[in-house]
Amino acid sequence: MIVAEYLPPRSHVLWELARQMGVRCAIVNAKPERTGLNPPWDIDALRRVQREFGRAGLKIHGLEGDQFDMGRIKLGLDGRDEDIERCCRMLRNMGELGIPLLCYNFMAQIGWFRSSVGVAGRGGALVSQFDLKEMPTSLTEAGEIPAERIWESYRYFVQHVMPVAEKAGVRMALHPDDPPLASLRGIGRIFGTPEAFERAYSLAPSPCSWRPNGSPGLRMPPGSISSGATIPSKFTDDTSVFEKREKCHANSMVFGRHGFDVDVRLCRGGGQAGRFRRQRCVCHSIFASRSVLGRVA
């Protein structure tokens, strides 16, 4: 088992705090807005970030999130082939530099989203909150995008990049949609149910997304999973989702897990998560290369 913390890509007080907690591995988003450098498809830029962590006694174990603008890929727009090639170049760079994990998502147009932040939670801690009633109802500039169009874009993407990831030795850990809604401001969101992940992994079977026994690799945030009312109730009971092997194959599938304490309030009759709050735990991320995360208490 490898314990890691999601850390800023530039030197930060959290780096020191991570070391004090005994954490030696980092998960990083190295996009230009955060590094001041080129995206990680430029190996010199990625190597520079890696060296900074190394000088601080930390090791980059994985990249998380969009490392550059993935909009054309996710929406299936002209120019996506160029962006996919950049993603492939990034995967090759990660393999060359020994960074074994990419946590990616396929939330188009709107990524991680909360209707409010800085809400007072347990013990006065500031937490984020999502309330469907507080969401704007207008469409984004992309207009209305059906889920099947996102599915087709995902198929096109994953079937191009997975062979490259496999050759580079980089595992692809797919993050569920957050929040796990079927649609957000007219944009279809496709990764909110166990069935959706089964469909995803059937599109590009690979050792980098599938273990030898056929179980898929997943970036597991219990909050995103448990806050989805579209998921059967047996999956919304704390972190017991890890034990539901008949649906999630937890004992061999989880490439990454991050912990949050989530207060879930589900819409009655609506079939989707209507409101939840999220409070951050001490350690954000737990990543495994070969160990069984489902057994971690």
Image: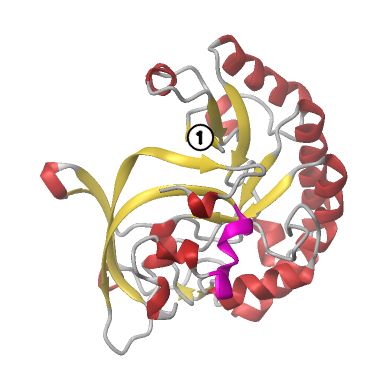
Q: Is residue 145 visible?
A: no
Name the spot of residue 51 as percent of width and height, x first.
Answer: 65, 15
Q: Nearer the viewer, residue 186 or 223?
A: 223
Name the spot of residue 77 as percent of width and height, x first.
Answer: 73, 64
Magenta segment's dominant SS is helix
Instruction: Characterize the local packing of mark 1: few (<14), some (14-19) or many (20 or more) Cα atoms within 10 angstroms.
Output: some
- Identity, as a three-letter code, of the amino acid under mark 1: Val
Q: Nearer the viewer, residue 187 or 123?
A: 123
Name the residue that disc number 1 marks.
3
Residue located at (67% from left, 41% from top): 101
Q: Is residue 32 left or right of residue 271?
A: right
Question: For the image shown, how many numbered marks are present on the structure?
Answer: 1
Q: Is residue 104 left or right of residue 244?
A: right
Q: Is residue 134 visible?
A: yes
* Magenta span: 245-254
Residue located at (78% from left, 41% from top): 91
Name the spot of residue 228 as percent of width and height, x first.
Answer: 40, 72
Q: Nearer the viewer, residue 261 or 182?
A: 261
